[in-house]
Amino acid sequence: MLFLLNPLTLHASYPLTETIYTIPEGKISAGVSVEALQADPYYREEDFVIGLGVLSNFTVWYSFIYYSDDLYAPAPGRLGDSFLSMWYYAGNYCNNTVHAGIFARFRIPTGKDVYTARDYHPAELGKNELMAGPVVQVKLWLLTLHANLFYVGRERPDESMSLLGVNPTANDSFLSKRNTGNDYIMGSLTAATDVLYPFIPHSGLRGARLMSASALKAGDNQEVLVEGLAPVNAAACEAGFRYFFTYDIYLGIYGTWNLTPETTGAIQHSAGLELAFEF
């Protein structure tokens, strides 16, 4: 079975977890998902992504989100945030059982600024953000486990990117120590199996913790949510399956559920449909 032989072929990110999916050099991957989310009120989110295999172990993606307040019918909407993602595949270990690499994602603030707007969506930020950390895949008998551990640095109203935040001596840098109160650590784990291929069932968990709720500056909007789920501690689960028409194209259905106590305006649950292909 091909999935057992080459884990780097089409195996795109799951709803709550990034994977080691590496686009072959010179190839392109594209995907679209439509998700209905219950927040306050219901709304529809459409995600579009395109990726390029720059090198055999280095992939770049660009994606953007489009929001609509009409759950079912076509309706005027607006652009949410955009993202530039980079993935470096480090290699395989333990006789091809473990695969690992580094993933980084930059949020481009094309959506509404949550610190000033009133009608923004829960997972929206409208500010600069950098997420980075390791991604690991482990083959464990019939299961393939995908794990992430990310640090997410979020820009505050009085901060700037300041050379992408890598200059800690700049007081307004969004990665300087004095401005990390609204950053958070996020971990996730998803299990999938190819035993039923071309059906690939999957289920996962995600948890996140704000670095320091007490460090939030006066005037900050403390209802800016972690992953659109909760102000400080956030947790969610997901389940779904993908059907592969060929090895390079699949259609998926999934649902997600917020496991944290209900927060006004937070995402409570969602249902999504996804399509992805490589060429």
Image (cartoon, helix red, strand yellow):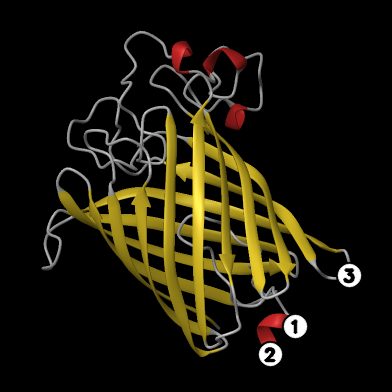
Mark 1 crowd level (few <14, some 14–19, many ≥20, 10 Å Cα)? few
Label 3 vs label 2: CA separation?
A: 18 Å
> Is residue 235 or residue 74 the one in the foreground?
235
In the picture, residue 10 is in which quadrant? bottom right
* Side of 168 relative to 217 (left or right): right
Disc 1: which residue: 5
Give the Cα distance between marks 3 and 1: 12 Å
Residue shown at the point (73%, 63%) measured from the top left: 138
> Furthest residue to the top?
218
Asked if residue 22 can be seen in this view, the reply is: no
Q: What percent of the width, then of the height, locates residue 201? A: 49, 74
Q: Earlier in the sequence, mark 3 or mark 2?
A: 2
175 relative to 65 in the view: left or right: right
Q: Which mark is residue 1?
A: 2
Secondary structure of residue under mark 2: loop
- Residue type at the position of mark 2: Met
Instruction: Please give left or right for residue 40 compared with residue 107 in the image.
Output: left
Element at badge 1? helix
Disc 3 is placed on an element classified as: loop
